[in-house]
Image: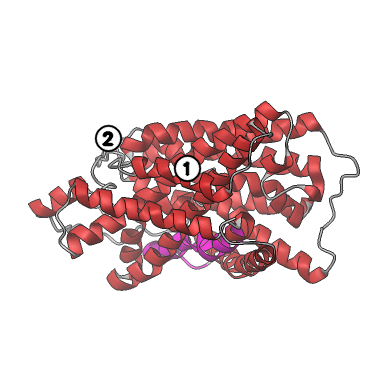
Amino acid sequence: MGTQGPPQENYVKPKSDKEKSVDDWLPITSSRNAKWWYSAFHNVTAMVGAGVLSLPFAMSELGWGPGIAVLILSWIITLYTLWQMVEMHEMVPGKRFDRYHELGQHAFGEKLGLWIVVPQQLIVEVGVDIVYMVTGGKSLKKFHDTVCHDCKSFKTTYFIMIFASVHFVLSQLPNFNSISGVSLAAAVMSLSYSTIAWGASVDKGRVEDVQYGYKSPSTGGTVLSFFSALGDVAFAYAGHNVVLEIQATIPSTPEKPSKKPMWKGVVVAYIVVALCYFPVALVGYWAFGNGVDDNILITLNKPRWLIAMANMMVVVHVIGSYQIYAMPVFDMMETVLVKKLNFPPGILLRLIARSLYVAFTMFVAITFPFFGGLLGFFGGFAFAPTTYFLPCIMWLAIYKPRKFSLSWIANWICIVLGVCLMILAPIGGLRQIIVDAKTYSFYS
């Protein structure tokens, strides 16, 4: 591809016993015995989030041609940038970049690397966890209302609290390998509810007088909705923020580097992603046209038992996804508490720090549950850089490919498209939040 190798830095400073014992305790580096299939289902769980259910709505705001183009382009670009991250994990002999910000520090320098990567990664991970709190609560409510439609209706707030209560327990699991069971269940569920979403749409067939034009009466509204939909698509491809952390759990030797099993898992995950995303987006839009809701399961209300089951699957899936995105945040919090503030590592520290995090995401979710607009806003603002173009900038900074070589051109295309996405999507998302906020009452 016309790339030169990375600069060789053979000298890696050995760690002291204290540093080793802290590393053995921290969630990302404590356990390194994962198999390639762990990488597959962790990546599926991280990638196929609740975002898949908003894809038919995104299609309705993009239209057939642009919608299909954006979906396919996103799939190709994000697979390419994910490959870059897997490759860069061990490019310095004898050292592993176990966390996204460590790779950032290698590419941009100690201080600048932290400032570039950590805020964006935190926005993504905490943002996703808040959105998943909302999704989990709303899906529980939908399940309750579908199963028992004559019962008294409860506030969404209560369902978000019920959903959060699970995480106060699960967040105490120490590391990635210990949540692999939860993650596997979540990955299976994502494939299942995606299949239900498009299968039920096929079964229902096209609704009468289906329309595929843009909904908004004004050109400005159409353009802003288009931008917001770009953010929804970016949100659907947000797995890069945890990819180095997942790879860190795979054992590695010079003869058998971790990138081989990791990449095998990623390819499997991406095939599953395609099987979930494309049918849901295309069939959902085909069946309902621009009348589809921002969550396709809300549009589908029959057969009742099937939709109830799909909503419960979303709940199980989002439980797993929440934990996958929370783990690097726990790792950052515990690193700061133990290494910078010198707290003793132990169960009490973990209990307090992680419970406070779960409580915080629950509080924000209860206060601002505008699902669609939040996706577009966060999707462009933080997901576009970490997923679409930050890996490319690091690749250019570290490998320095020749100008106008294939690698150089590919990276610059990704960077330009990613920057456009970062600028345009939040504008649309913010408008969507403002529109939703007009009809919204607090803690309803």
Question: Where does the image place residue 270, in percent across and percent down from the top left?
Answer: 53, 40
> Of the residues shown, which amino acid type is indicated by label 1?
Ile
Please name the residue that numbered disc 1 is placed on: 162
For this orientation, the residue located farthest to the right is 209
Taking the spot 68% from the left edge, 50% from the top edge, the residue there is 294
| Quadrant of res 200 | top right
Question: Which region of the structure is painted magenta?
Answer: 375-403
Asked whether residue 341 appears in the rendered view, the answer is yes
| Marks 2,1: beta carbons within 8 A | no
Question: Where does the image place residue 423, in percent across and percent down from the top left?
Answer: 59, 70
> Of the residues shown, which amino acid type is indicated by label 2?
Asn
Q: Main secondary structure of the magenta part?
A: helix
**Above or below, 307 relative to 373:** above
Q: Earlier in the sequence, mark 2 or mark 1?
A: 2
Queried whether the magenta region covers residue 147, the answer comes back as no
Mark 2 or 1: in front is 1
Taking the spot 74% from the left edge, 31% from the top edge, the residue there is 302
Please name the residue that numbered disc 2 is placed on: 33
| Quadrant of res 254 | top left
Badge 1 marks a residue whose secondary structure is: helix
